[in-house]
Amino acid sequence: MKTNKVKTRTGDSGIRFPIGAKLILLISIIVILSLGSITVLVSWLVRGDLRISAEENNFETNRRSAMEAEVTIDNVRSHSRMLMQTIAAVGAGSTIAQQTSNLFFSENPQIVSVFFITPGNPEQLLVNNRFFITREIETQLAGAYFDDQRGALGRVIRGETVLLNAAPHFGIPVLALFFPLQTGGFGGVVFSSENLNQNFGYGINQSYMINSDGYILSHSDFSLVRSGVNISSEDFIREILDSPQKNRQQLIESDFRLLQSGSFDNENFPVIRKFVAFTRLNTAGTVVITSIEYDKVFEGIAATTRRNMYLTIAVLCISIIFIWFFSKTISIPLKALAYVARNIEGGVFEMDLKPKGRDEIGVLTNSFQKMCAALHIFGRFTNKEIAVKAMRGEIKPGGLPKHASIFFSDIRGFTAKSESFTNVFGEDASDRIVHWLNNYFTKMVDCVEKTNGVVDKFIGDAVMAHWGTAYSAGSPRKDAFNAVNAALMMRKALYELNKERDPDDPANPSIQIGCGINSGIVTAGQLGSDMRMEYTVIGDPVNLASRIEALTKPLAADILISEDTWLLTEDKFITEEMPSVSVKGKEKPVRIFAVINTAGNEKGPQTMADVRNLLGIEAPEISKVDVNADEKKYNINPNS
């Protein structure tokens, strides 16, 4: 085939403004405008935007931190309450109570110990031994702690819920939650706050949690938690605790010495401005506070402004000197590429491009050359992926025997649906049908490609695909599994697609399909002419797959597989054997199996009755089915 030589033409009467002149003009305008306005923009617009952004980010961080703390506390309380009520119901000394306790601490490793008293029962103390062992602390600390908290228990008896910092007693970040039980009595639970401490200290926003008495419960600086610091004497903390609002944010000026040192001493702490946001939780008057330093928000603006001005001036001076000469190295190759693009638009793909240099233009030129070759090959194939493999030499000319799994599917009642489109939409029916089919094909093709299959062709509303030909998962078993799995994915995708449809929408009716799969040795290769080719498979297994697909309607099944496919995948799927089929050209009846679900998958259908009920398919009377009425190639043996 003749290859067109590309001649670089430096003169083109269509060019009115050279690239070099445009670049110099554009850069000059940008730099001049920048020099005059950058200071105002940074000091006014950017500063204002940064403040708004910082406040919003601080408030959002506080909201997320509060949500995380709320969820953590609620989960601990609900899980512990369920444990307490269960043990109270079955008896503390029973085997079930012990098993329940062990399971509880296994599922909730962050919980340290549980203490509760219920009417008619003695005090109960449950300890997570694994937690104490892994942290090398004594289990006796749990009992001693609850003995020391009689004051808190008294508050709980009066109906309060109390959240305390237990870190000073245990020496590790833990919290203690005391609450009344709905069935009478009360309980307490000690749980780890390590995750809260770590998450509260993430980034430049500092979050911490205090209780209604002003004691720090969680903080990224564990020394404040371990020391049991109370910050209620801070003016802004007292204002937060006394505030009736659930959440708020404001700019605070303070030395924040308690949060920096944990005590009032003679150290000289400068006054700091911070954005402080708080959210009051629904539990025990607990408050989550998040702050960010005001100066940190704006510290980079001034330095960035100066650097930008110096850099802009330098770039302008250098650019004006070199841009014109550099533009020539861009404009000349681009003219050649424009010439190639015009030829591609005209359908001429074979072009001889010679990249000059190894810069981006050279890479782009080389890519254009490869694209031209690829487009020439793509024009001969209906499957782009196959064309790419052929271009790479991964598919050789001629046919090769392949052990493949062949798939056919079509839409039930497509003719009637097409007539409905015509009756409703008239002249627009064709466009409506194509749009409807394309939406359906998109879902089906996605299932095939996700399972390493190849879409062979579309035959009207039918889809033909195969596995183990151009691509293989490594063995016929894996290819067969992928084929059947793709059909199950199609069932699910189509079920979800039908759920989204309006049942009264004539432009988007629901779809039911029948799928037939067979496995065997086929001939795979490129068929066609020099001008048009396609990669496909031929052979008796292909014909049988098509015939099996045709049986889905009389057998009221959406997925049918042959015995050959079943033997490769019998342990992977739940199947139900259907009546054997006598196929023209076969000495023995062919065993057929309906695919129900993936083996071991307890979700979804477990029998063919479940499948038919899910898809709205009426169960057939096999003895009355006359397949020969439509297809003389098969005959169902209902007694097999």
Image (spheres, rainbow, N blue to C red):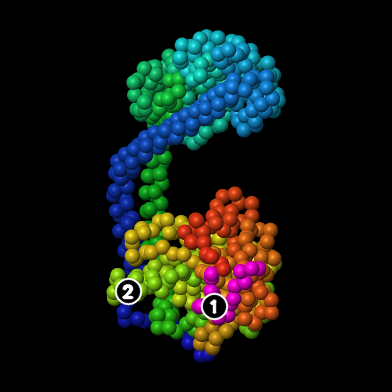
| Rendered view: 409 above or below 529 | above
Dot 2 or dot 1, earlier in sequence: 2
Residue 325: give x, y in percent of width and height. 41, 70
> Residue at the spot x=33%, y=62% of the render?
505
Q: Are marks 2 and 1 in contact (CB under 8 Å)?
A: no
**Residue 166 in the image, given as x and y percentages of width and height:** 57, 18
- Alpha-carbon neighbours of circle 1 within 10 Å: few (<14), some, or many (≥20)? few
Q: Residue at x 48, y 86 (%)?
A: 5
Q: Which residue is mark 2?
A: 422
- Badge 2 amino acid: Thr
Classify residue 404 as left or right of residue 408: right
Query: Horizontally, is 58 left or right of 364 in the view?
Result: left
Q: Which residue is mark 1?
A: 628
Q: Determine the secondary structure under disc 1.
A: helix
Q: Residues within 10 Å of mark 2 (few under 14, many from 20)?
A: some
The amino acid type found where label 1 is placed reads Asn
Q: Quadrant of the C terminus?
A: bottom right
x, y percent for residue 545: 59, 74
Q: Nearer the viewer, residue 420 or 103?
A: 420
| Residue 395: assigned label | none
Q: Secondary structure at mark 2?
A: helix
Which mark is nearer the camera, 2 or 1?
1
Q: Which residues are magenta?
A: 624-640
Q: Is residue 356 visible?
A: no
